[in-house]
Amino acid sequence: MQTTSPRQINSSAPVVAIVGATGAVGVELINCLESRNFPVGGLKLLASARSAGKTLPFKGNDVAIEELTARSFEGVDVALFSAGASISRRHAQDAVGAGAIMVDNSSAFRMDPNVPLVVPEVNGEALSRHNGIIANPNCVAAIATVALAPLHKAHPIRRLSMVTYQAASGAGAAAMEELRESTAAQLRGESYAPKVLPHPYAFNLFSHNADVDVDSGYNGEELKVVAETRRILGVDDLPIGITCIRVPVLRAHAMSISVEFDEVVTPEEARALLQGGQGLRLVDDRAANHFPMPSEASGQDDVLVGRVRVDTADPSGRTLALFAAGDQLLKGAALNAVQIAELLLKR
């Protein structure tokens, strides 16, 4: 699967395949390619056999969905995968062997030392080390590191403490529909039995539904965010404490982050660094009590960051608290993958 040097996209109008085209992230991948005017020379939409023959719109045309098979990647330059880890592992060799560069949105290759884990605004240079596969991070790790990168580059981060408030979109289209249906039922005074998530979702919040490690007490989502954030920021031993919570929001994750630095960093300097950060929009109006919200982050490419203040739990003054929100389906998934493809075109 490895090559002697990083594979390039040799076409100025590459053929793009989307694996998992009918899912929530797959649909957003199509939208991102169109809205960002990615120079698509040809588009292959791939999904399961039950979706084959249906169509999805792209640039005013209806594109037929094809069944995903081992031969689906012939003539493909870039394959954007968003169909789960098992599908990614099963078809990785098919894609790379056919000459495509695979950008994978699943967890399958994120911790593989031979596969770069990339957030373009943070560590885009890692693309120079790919061998045909590039991993897209966990949505929380992608959104958080965009917010942290300008601070970390100016003042190395010593410790992170995070609490996340994660939307239904992170659990897929079925969870989003369950939130709609259960909310409507609750408002009608009717009972609703959860089908997708383990607990009632309407007007409720609960620990992230990933499996919990019985020894540590941390769930799989928390462990992924810790490992991936360290890898993206390039600090293998960065201490990170985290609690991930599922909240009744359709899309866009939010997170409260406490950041300890090696030295004192004032809120004023932090705001200036964040204001100039790539992929960020500072939302920090104390007088109006206006800070990042999922409702304003939804549908936006930028990560919103604000509520920047001294963390009074640290008397040394080296710790700041902030709040961020980012669209899980965009910067947390589809947008990040398309941005990776854009960088590959420029190399």
Image: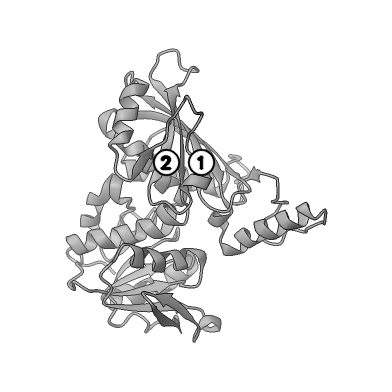
Q: Which numbered dot is residue 293?
A: 1
Q: Residue at x 36, y 56 (%)?
A: 336
Amino acid type of disc 2?
Leu
Quadrant of the image occupied by residue 151: top left
**Circle 2 SS class:** strand
Q: Which residue is drawn at 46% across and 17% down?
A: 314
Per the model, the C-alpha gap separating discs 2 and 1 is 8 Å
Name the image quarter holding the N terminus.
bottom left
Q: Is residue 41 left or right of residue 145?
A: left
How many marks the image carries: the answer is 2
Q: Which of 165 and 297 is in front in this view?
A: 297
Quadrant of the image occupied by residue 341: bottom left
Query: 10 Å neighbourhood of mark 1: few (<14), some, or many (≥20)?
Result: many
Q: Which numbered dot is residue 67?
A: none
Instruction: Residue 248: give x, y in percent of width and height.
Output: 63, 48
Residue 296 versus residue 285 in the image, above or below: below
- Farthest top residue? 315
Residue 58 versus residue 2 in the image, above or below: below
Amino acid type of disc 1?
Met
Q: Nearer the viewer, residue 296 or 230?
A: 296
Mark 2 in CB contact with mark 1 (< 8 angstroms)? yes
Name the image quarter holding the C terminus.
bottom left
Instruction: Residue 185: give x, y in percent of width and height.
Output: 76, 57
Residue 119 versus residue 258 in the image, above or below: below
Q: Which numbered dot is residue 304?
A: 2
Q: In this view, does 217 lie to the left or right of 134?
A: right
Query: 10 Å neighbourhood of mark 2: few (<14), some, or many (≥20)?
Result: many
Q: Which residue is drawn at 17% across and 65% down?
A: 4
